[in-house]
Amino acid sequence: MQKRPWRAEFFEHIATEIAAAPGRGRILELGSGPGFLARQLLERLPGATMHLLDQSNAMHSLARERLGELAARATFLTASFKEPDWPDRLGPYDFVVTLQAVHELRHKRHALPLHRQVRSVLAPGGVYLMADHFCGPGGMANDQLYLRIDEQQAALREAGFTHVTELLREGGLVLHRAA
């Protein structure tokens, strides 16, 4: 994580959003990778449980190691959120979180279907906390892979989220809260 020290600020914002909703601690992380965000959330939120969805068993192994005893509050799901059936038999969740994963869909046109799928696994009143790279000043240049901030917000609204807020923008990433 030293290569990207600003990520800690994103972890903190996500944890703070979840902590502000006591009693709502069922969390799904999409593209959970080696468990950096999961560790932060499980340490900070003692009542939370997490489902960590990643397509790589190797990443799950790294996450289990990183989580240590906290892994008892995590369920590891091997699946790809690029596949249309990933939400089947999942949910409902109080929160769906993702950090630096949406662009892995490999084209921005796939963001809207993903956001709709996320909405389908959220419990009533659930919140989607989505941080990813953006296209534009301070962000990335590839306008086919990365959405502009206004495009991301429009996609979230089109997916059925009525309250979309930008929480943080730093290091070429933007964090949105969608409910």
Image (cartoon, helix red, strand yellow):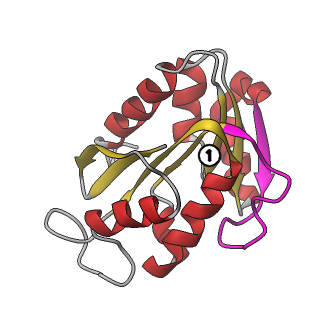
- Magenta span includes 83: yes
Q: Residue furthest bottom?
A: 144
Residue 142 placement, left or right of 85:
left
For the N terminus, give its image quadrant.
Answer: top left
Question: Which of these two is toward me, 83 or 44?
Answer: 83
Q: Residue furthest left?
A: 137
Q: Amino acid at mark 1?
A: Glu
Task: Give the quadrant of residue 163.
Answer: top left
Give how far across and how far down residue 172 sits, in percent.
Answer: 25, 58
The residue depicted at 28 percent of the width and 63 percent of the height is 149
* Residue 107 visible: no
Q: Which residues are magenta?
A: 74-93
Question: Quick one: label 1, few (<14), some, or many (20+) residues within 10 Å?
Answer: many
Task: Give the quadrant of residue 123.
Answer: top right
The residue depicted at 32 percent of the width and 48 percent of the height is 4
Give how far across and how far down residue 102 sits, in percent.
Answer: 49, 64
The residue depicted at 62 percent of the width and 55 percent of the height is 118
What element does badge 1 sit on? strand
**Vertical comparison of 116 with 61: above or below:** below
- Magenta span includes 156: no
Residue 31 placement, left or right of 168:
right
Give how far across and how far down residue 85 sits, in percent.
Answer: 78, 68
Residue 69 placement, left or right of 166:
right
- Label 1 belongs to which residue? 29
Question: Which of these two is toward me, 141 or 112?
Answer: 112
**Vertical comparison of 90 with 124: above or below:** below
* Residue 112 visible: yes
- Magenta: predominant secondary structure element? loop
